[in-house]
Image (cartoon, rainbow, N blue to C red):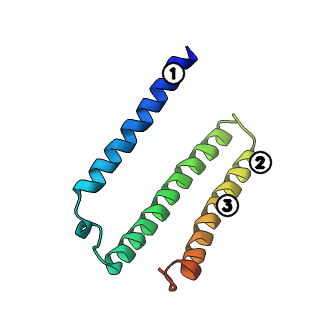
Amino acid sequence: MYFKTSLVKKAGSAVTRSLMAISLSLLPAAAFAQGLDQADQAMDDFRVWAYGALAIGCLIYMLYQVSMALLQKQPWADVLMGLVYCAIAGGIMVAADFAWSIWGTGGAL
């Protein structure tokens, strides 16, 4: 049984590597060289999207926590801990943005 599963795993990774090599060889190098300005714009767009996704996720999580506390399914201390978790997640995003501004492109996004 182990022999069969290990062969399947090896074959899957070989197929993945082969497909990656074929796709990279067929695409021209000019497709990858779009310029630094477009890359900076793409990173800025991703940052805005990530902040939005985090805000929506935290909002839904906090609404769930508050509704569970109002229905007396959990104590209010869990709601406060949920607020702490959301603050930590936001702090990680801000810290990543700060680190990118120092070591990433040399300037703030």
Q: Horizontal and vertical percent for residue 69?
A: 68, 41
Per the image, the residue denoted by label 1 is 5
Decide which of tag 1 and tag 2 comes sooner along the chain: 1
Is residue 1 left or right of 13 when viewed as pictured? right
Q: Horizontal and vertical percent for residue 107?
A: 50, 86
Q: What residue type is labelled 2?
A: Ala
Numbered circles on residues, count = 3
Residue 58: quadrant of the picture: bottom right
Q: In the image shown, does 82 or 28 lie closer to the viewer?
A: 28
Q: Residue at x 68, y 51 (%)?
A: 82
Is residue 29 left or right of 82 when viewed as pictured? left
Q: Which mark is residue 88?
A: 3
Decide which of tag 2 and tag 3 comes sooner along the chain: 2
Q: In the image shown, does 32 or 3 lie closer to the viewer?
A: 3
Per the image, the residue denoted by label 2 is 77
Distance CA(mark 1)–CA(mark 3): 41 Å
Q: Which amino acid does label 3 sit on?
A: Ile
Distance CA(mark 2)–CA(mark 3): 17 Å
Q: Residue 97 carries which label?
A: none
Q: Horizontal and vertical percent for residue 49?
A: 42, 63
